[in-house]
Image: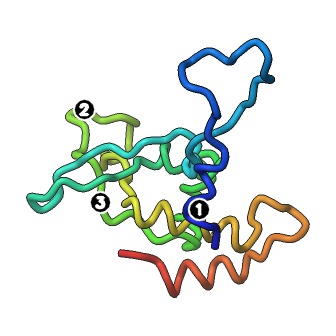
Amino acid sequence: MKDPLYRFNELLDFPGGRTPKNREKRNIAIAEDRFNGVKPKNYIINGQTVQMFTIGQLAVALKKRPSTLRVWEHRGWLPKAKYRTPKPNKQQLPGKPSKGRRLYSLEQVEFLVEAIDRFKIHDIHNADWNGFRKHIKEQWPH
């Protein structure tokens, strides 16, 4: 575990927005971006405001495509989304019922980001798919 004060060691040692001429410029990320720039949206579920992610936002956070996550859901590797946006008024695809977008909680997104890192899913040669699927099945947050 990192020392909680480690971020303060990287702070600039001069005030203001401009670097003094006699010092080199440093590029320092102040905060870690765990979700690749994706921000949750607030939805009201059972009378409470909850931060949720659509499948497209989840895909960006996981560095995957939404179609990949739909395939994982279809194969049973990911549980079906418990919540959806309201279904659209008009039919989107002929012959298919409109359902609304899948919604995932902040806890579920954090869980998936951690699981993908833990089981090395981005590494084609060392990915532990069996461990990943078992972990998802047994530990999925509701």
Q: Nearer the viewer, mark 3 or mark 2?
A: 3
* Amino acid type, mark 3: Tyr
Task: Report crowding for label 1: few under 14, some 14 to 19, many 20 or more residues within 10 A (C-alpha).
Answer: some
Q: Observer-nearest residue: 50 or 86?
A: 50
Q: Which amino acid, mark 2?
A: Lys
Number of residue marks: 3
Residue 60 in sight here: no
Q: Which residue is mark 3?
A: 83
Indicate the secondary structure of the residue bearing disc 1: helix
Query: Residue 46 occupies which quadrant of the picture?
Result: bottom left
Location of the N terminus (image quadrant): bottom right
Q: Which residue is mark 1?
A: 113
Q: Position of residue 119 (x, y in %)?
A: 73, 73
Left or right: where 69 falls relative to 108: right
Dots 1 and 3: beta carbons under 8 Å? no
The secondary element bearing badge 3 is classed as strand
Of helix, strand and loop, which one carries label 2? loop
Q: CA distance from mark 1 to mark 2?
A: 34 Å
Of the residues shown, which amino acid type is indicated by label 1?
Val
Q: Residue at x 57, y 56 (%)?
A: 69
Q: Quadrant of the C terminus?
A: bottom left
Query: Residue 96, image x and y in percent?
Result: 38, 46
Whether residue 23 appears in this view of the structure is yes
Query: Whole-percent x and y of residue 115?
Result: 62, 71
As measured in the structure, the alpha-carbon distance from the residue carrying label 3 to the one carrying label 2 is 20 Å
Outermost residue toward the left in this view: 47
Q: Are the two marked residues, 3 and 2, in contact with CB atoms closer than 8 angstroms?
A: no
Instruction: Mark 3: give few (<14), some (14-19) or many (20+) Cα within 10 Å.
Output: some
- Check disc 2 and report the residue beneath it: 90
